[in-house]
Image (cartoon, helix red, strand yellow):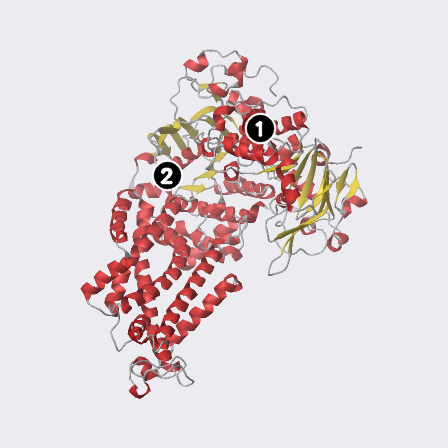
Amino acid sequence: MTAPLLNVEDLRVTFARRSGPLEAVRGVSFQVGRGEILGLVGETGSGKTLTGLSLLRLVPPPGITTAGRMEFDGIDLLSVDRARLRDIRGRRIAMIFQDPAASLNPVFTVGSQLDAAIAAHARLSAPERRVRALERLVEVGLPEPALVSQRYPHELSGGMQQRVMIALALSGDPDLLVADEPTTALDVTIQAQILDLLLRLRQERGLSIVLVSHHLGIVSETCDRVALMYAGRIVEAGPTATVLESPLHPYSGSLLDSIVSRGRRKQPLAVIPGLGPAPGPLPPGCAFAPRCPRAIERCRDETPELSTVDGRSVACWVAATGPDHG
Amino acid sequence: MAEPLLRVSDLVRHFRTDTGTTVRAVAGVSLEVQRGSTLAIVGESGCGKTTLARCVIGAIRPTTGTIAFAGQDLTRLRGAALRTARARLGFVQQNPMSALDPTMRVRDIVAEPLRIHRPIRGQQLDERVVELLGLVSLRRAVLEQRPGELSGGQAQRVAIARAIALGPELLVLDEPTSALDLSVQAQILNLLVDLQARLSLTYVLISHDLDVVEHVSDVIAVMYLGRVVEQLEGGKLHEAARHPYTIALVSATPTVGLSGRGERIVLRGDVPDQGQDSIGCAFASRCWLRTQLDNPSDCDEREPALSHRGDAQLVACHFADRTREGSMA
Amino acid sequence: MAVLLGDRGTAVGLAIVATVLIAAVAAAWISPYADQGAGVPNVIEKLRPPSAAHPFGTDELGRDVLSRIMFGGRVSLAMAFAVVAMGILIGVPLGAAAGYFGGWVDELLMRITDVFLAFPPLLLAIVVATALGAGFASATVALGITWWPWYARLARSQAASLRDRPFVEAARVIGVRSPGILSRHVIPNLAGPILVQATLDLAAVILIGSGLSFLGLGVQPPTADWGTMVSSGRVYILAFPWYVTFPGLTIVLASVGFVLVGDGLRRALDLRPTDASL
């Protein structure tokens, strides 16, 4: 078994506040193999975006990122110095975001932004960079790359902008791409194009992808493995089909039951009772316990650790102590 | 068949852009909604569905065309008559956080329509507000809160309470669940279905989410570039869709646990700019069927008209009968 | 409020502003020589340097400078608040209407605003004050006239962006009519930036108002304000520097205090918890 490309153990992101520290990511562990697509799924407040950001040490202050281990291809991401980190960002690990219009500089053309990105990671002459830039634009499926190169971001559609962002992300030839809700702002047919592009890039380049999303359908169709997060922790993780078709964790089960495509026409949809976790320090025990239909005493006292059950990891006392496919 | 509660006829709405060109956001749409039913209008950005909704609700005036509500043409009414008619319609917008005035308290937000249109004040008004909050399952505690203090789900409930305050007969809902978390979407959809039955409401639902639409609609109208390209019965999208665009939309919608699904259709290119005065079919530039059929000239020369395919279905495509050949599931 | 106090700069600003305001309002009760502050001379003690009896020294008529500053604060601060109030009361409704309605209303109002903005503020104030005759009222009116266009501009841009917001559209759809929309939805939502601007303007008016008084166009003796004190003290600057220095420092300190508060408000209003994406 080859070593994973990315190995994260006990990742924590804490925000110092006057009212006390707020732990937004509370001990997350996962791995990503080469050429693998991992989905980080969760609702608002689950900590999935912060987890993605922390891989590139991009969590904005006053957030502090700590971990037991955060290794990328043998490099310890926690202890690298600034220069090395700058080198890694873009050249080894790249990131794309939700709103391409906000992430592209409006006063520079696509071509000049791409040129700057390539120049940052490789010592090439101007004509060589230009060739590379056009190659990237073709790779992301943009028609007439020479023309697109001369356009400003606002002159492009949302789908094209997102492709440009992906081209920028690929300009350093990274091994890992962190994609934070890359298609949420796009129409569904354009979304299909972009997801297809990501799959193709994985195929052609062996690119590993960490896809952060709140959309179970996207994750189901794109990711090899999925990690479902709730209140800053992973509650269930494993091969996508396994987790989504026969979930073990009560939250996974309830969430999947409540999605609209599972409902019967015009009949009430299954609903998870109660409200999501409020931001702020949480009481001891499992964060989902107050809303969980199968909670036992132990759930309120001890926070469950991930344990392997039935081909995937689950953080649940009830699921761990006896497979109960309710 | 009974007289529809809402009948939109040949609605057209143009916008002039800063550069002086005219955009035809809605290019001739005709629809009917029966009392007590839900009509869903689906499409992607630029298809005109939001503009259409805003015309129906009266936020903007159509360029040409009529909107007949319970027999009255809303486009011809003015002043008091218009205000009275508008009170029979309610509007729920997409993002509850921006649809509620951040400086107002919930109690005043829900009371606002009542203050304008009804002579009730004081205690009676307060009671009605509490009653409305109860209908959307909110407790009195939220009365004194401001939108910033509410969760997305709570805020949307407040918006719904405001929309039903005057006891309207028709609600126009613009993407009512898109801005909400997954688990909250289910709650709000359940609320909407429940309210429809309890208050005998008719819904016009704008959405881009096919799952939501299939779950609640009786009739689905698919729009592309300002026109309706297909209309069919709710719940039948997967089996009955005939227009190549509708089929592409269904195919593009990511769904959990899709094993045994055919190849996904990925459309080429982007949604073209509106306002191009095109001859022929607006979808031709991206149509997979046209490619499959070797670019027949009809697609470029004649704009297809909506024609019947079975009682409850309308399709605007020259080759609607050919779309079900092949492996489209 | 808690957010404001937490920020050190703002806390300092608030402390200064509070001190200045209290000193001014309560001048009659807490100043060491209330009658002198009000103008009663005490010629025997004239031009004494700072001492235990007179912490800021005395002026050319023997009056305690500290008391004069406290009484003078009433005038300077009253003028500042009055001018800003005028600016807001005239400028905000006009600007909000212009921004909300657009079209010819906007054009008309903005051209009027442009006329006023074309004049350098101090110059316009001098002209008006001269025309109306010197004194507190005319100085205040003069400054008010130069100030309202800035509020109109600010209100206009805020109103224009608010006009298309969903909650404003919702109000229109509900049937709220334009005056109602302006008063209940648009204006309350522009209060934030206006408040910030007002606080900063208080500082500016203190300075410019002092300038007018310095030029003799503000209040007349024996009433003092900080500007007239600096003006009177000018001739004594070499031999008796405290006479000019302390009022001058007070002007600067008060302005700084308001600016710090204004900046803190601006920062507090910008910090909205929109981290829903996390």
* Residue drawn at (47%, 15%) of the image: B318
Say which of A13 and C52 sits in front. Answer: C52
> Is the residue A292 above or below the residue B40 in the image?
below
- From what the image shows, is residue A249 above or below residue A302? above
Count of numbered circles in the view: 2
Between the residue at mark 2 and the residue at mark 1, the CA separation in whole angstroms equals: 34 Å
User: In terms of secondary structure, where does tag 1 sit?
Assistant: helix
Foreground mark, 2 or 1, reads 1
Residue type at mark 1: give it: Ala
* Residue B71 sits in quarter: top left
Q: Position of residue C124 (x, y in %)?
A: 24, 58
Please determine whether, in this image, residue B28 is positioned above or below residue C112.
above
Say whether residue C59 is visible.
yes
Q: Disc 2 marks which residue?
A: B58
Q: Residue furthest bottom?
A: C44
Location of the N terminus of chain A (image quadrant): top right
Residue in view at x 79 percent, y 37 percent: A310
| Residue B209 seen in the figure | no
Residue B48: give x, y in percent of width and height.
Answer: 43, 31
Within 10 Å of disc 2 (Cα), the crowding (few <14, some 14-19, many 20+) is many
Left or right side of A267 for B96: left
Residue B305 shown left or right of residue B180 in the figure: left
In this view, the residue in front, A139 or C110, is: A139
Instruction: Identify the image quadrant of the C terminus of chain A.
Output: top right
Question: Which kind of residue does numbered mark 2 sit on?
Answer: Gly
Residues under numbered marks 2 and 1 in contact, where contact means CB atoms less than 8 Å apart: no
Q: Residue C221 appears at what percent x and percent y?
A: 25, 76
* Residue wearing tag 1: A192
Mark 1, Cα crowd under 10 Å, few <14 / some 14-19 / many 20+, is many
Q: Chain of mark 1?
A: A
Q: Secondary structure at mark 2?
A: loop
